Amino acid sequence: MQEKRVITVGILTMSDKGSKGEREDISGLEIRRMVAELGSVVKAYEVIPDEVPVIEERLKNFSDELKLDLVLTTGGTGVTPRDVTPEATFAIIERSLPGMSEVMRFESMKKTPYAMISRAVCGIRGTTLIINLPGSPKAVRENLAAVLPAIRHTVEKINGSTEDCATL
């Protein structure tokens, strides 16, 4: 049996207040805690303002320069004027994974009708899986839990695994 590879992770928090040190990033900490069960190592973590060019640049850096397997963003997926994470993500991904976004919204709808206004995007850039998560710790837990079971398999497929996708 082949040993499971360590998944390299980047966490990118979009928060104007957090980037100025005016708010603690509880959601980023929650992501770190949850991805530990993947057999992963967090190689990059940043809190940045809600600015499209900044988000695009950091997503590209995490994917193209750091060559991370997985980038999880938190914040900026709603409908306020400063919520621009989906626009920045769409601008840099090469392939979208709408099923992941759909399952996150579907599972969240079981808890709140506000889930329907989430604009979270999931996609691939090079060999990096990028997943947008909401900004609240509770929503991070719910959304990440919905896709966590598929992340390792997705990362392996992005990186060329030819193993069958069938499950028992």
Image: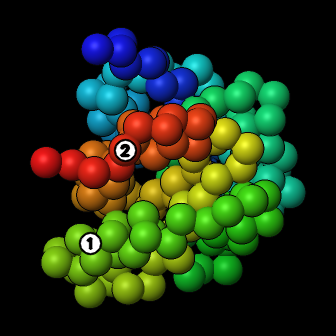
Q: Quadrant of residue 67?
A: top right
Report how many numbered discs are placed on residues in the image: 2
Left or right: 60 with respect to 5?
Answer: right
* Residue 165 in picture, x, y percent from top left: 35, 49
Q: Tell me the amino acid under the disc marked 2.
A: Asp
**Residue 111 against residue 46 in the figure, above or below:** below
Q: Which residue is mark 2?
A: 164
Q: Tell me the amino acid under the disc marked 1.
A: Ser
Does label 2 or label 1 sit earlier along the sequence?
Answer: 1
The numbered disc on residue 108 is 1
Nearer to the camera, 90 or 95: 95
* Residue 164 in picture, x, y percent from top left: 37, 44
Asked if the residues shown at circle 2 and circle 1 are in contact, with their CB atoms under 8 angstroms apart, the answer is no
Nearer to the camera, 82 or 5: 5
Query: Residue at image x 39%, y 75%?
Result: 102
Query: Residue at image x 59%, y 36%?
Result: 160
Q: Quadrant of residue 46?
A: top right
For label 2, count other residues whose C-alpha is less than 10 Å away and answer few (under 14), some (14-19) or many (20+).
few
Query: Residue at image x 46%, y 57%?
Result: 133
Q: CA distance from mark 2 to mark 1?
A: 30 Å
| Local secondary structure at mark 2 | loop
Which of discs 2 and 1 lies nearer the camera? The answer is 2
**Residue 16 against residue 160 in the figure, above or below:** below
**Residue 23 against residue 88 in the figure, above or below:** above
Left or right: 87 with respect to 80?
Answer: right
| Local secondary structure at mark 1 | helix
Residue 86 can be seen in this image? yes
Judging from the image, the colouring scheme is rainbow
* Residue 37 in picture, x, y percent from top left: 27, 28
